[in-house]
Amino acid sequence: MLDGDLARYREQGFIVIPGFKSADAIAGLRARAQAIVEAFDPREAASIFTTKDDSVRSDAYFMESGEAIRCFFEEEAFDETGVLRTPKARAINKIGHAMHDLDPVFEAFSHDERLADIAFAIGLRQPLIYQSMYIFKQPQIGGEVTWHQDAAFFDTDPPSVTGFWFALEDARRDNGCMWAQPGGHRSPLRARFVASNGSARLRAIDPTPWPTIDDAVPLEVEAGTLVVFDGMLPHYSAPNRSPRSRHAYTLHVVDGTAKYSKDNWLQRSALPLRGFA
Ligand code: FE2
């Protein structure tokens, strides 16, 4: 982190660190993701991921993915008759959620001493990586991700979840870059994704309105950039209608000294939680 990054993080709720990962590291991760998709049989799951509506997730394929490596489709991947509109490799929304522990290439990318340094610098005393996601944001059909706070999915007391977001391709407005509301991390948590009896649903807990694009800045960044953001920071990404994909990789990290809610959807049982080191 550079001088001023910490102050900027506190003030804005995020920092942008260009050139964090090498072209080689990115190429290795992309090749590995492609191999995972190639090995994936779509009949395993027609599971679709979206945060667009107050979606209820009751499928075991999703609910049990916190300790697995699974592929999820784009919402617009299927036609009205349930047939894939595009080849499989162009229809996957994301891979989740434990590649950082289960796949050697993802593990090497995720367990990076420099990430531990950043986590400690921003105040996480015992950073634990709960989740990894490889996000494809496919050309033309890459779905919108409506305004949300990642803390909705990882409730802790005190709040601690922090996102580490790596651009694997250039992210621009036309291919659906993230937008964030500077300073918005000081606003209340508006919703929680609460699990019970094998399903989970988004529940409103505070009526504070979401920001609009006018309140936000586009995070237009080059491949290799790391964006670190506070789990309370409202962020959004538009659909990708461009001919270019917008691959990204994210890690969600929680402070092990904070109390992790028992009704968060992602609970680890068999697979031990680990930090960056
Ligand atoms: Fe998010």
Image (tube, helix red, strand yellow):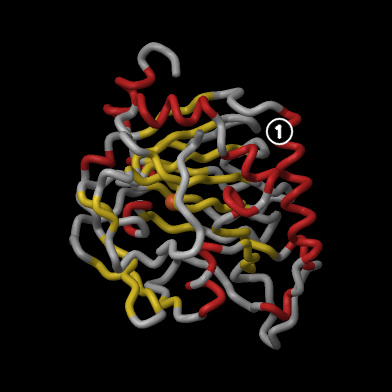
Q: Position of residue 245 (x, y in %)?
A: 70, 49
* 133 horizontally vs 116: left or right: right
Local packing at callout 1 (Cα closer than 10 Å; few below 14, some 14-19, many 20+) is some
Q: Nearer the viewer, residue 142 or 204?
A: 204
Q: Position of residue 49 (x, y in %)?
A: 54, 68
Q: Position of residue 111 (x, y in %)?
A: 56, 37
Which residue is at a point 60% across and 37% down the rendered structure image? 167
Q: Position of residue 113 (x, y in %)?
A: 52, 27
Q: Give the quarter of the image for residue 40.
A: bottom right
157 relative to 4, above or below: below
How many badges with numbers are in the image? Answer: 1
Q: Nearer the viewer, residue 180 or 92?
A: 92
Which residue is at a point 77% across and 53% down the rendered structure image? 34
Mark 1 = which residue?
A: 25
Which residue is at a point 56% across and 24% down the rendered structure image? 18
226 relative to 143, above or below: above
SS assignment at label 1? helix
Q: Give the quarter of the image for residue 110.
A: top right
Which residue is at a point 45% across and 81% down the rendered structure image? 58
Q: Residue furthest bottom?
A: 81
What amino acid is at disc 1?
A: Ala
Q: Nearer the viewer, residue 107 or 137?
A: 107
Quarter of the image where the N terminus is located: top left
Q: Is mark 1 within 8 Å of ligand 1?
A: no
Q: Residue furthest top?
A: 3
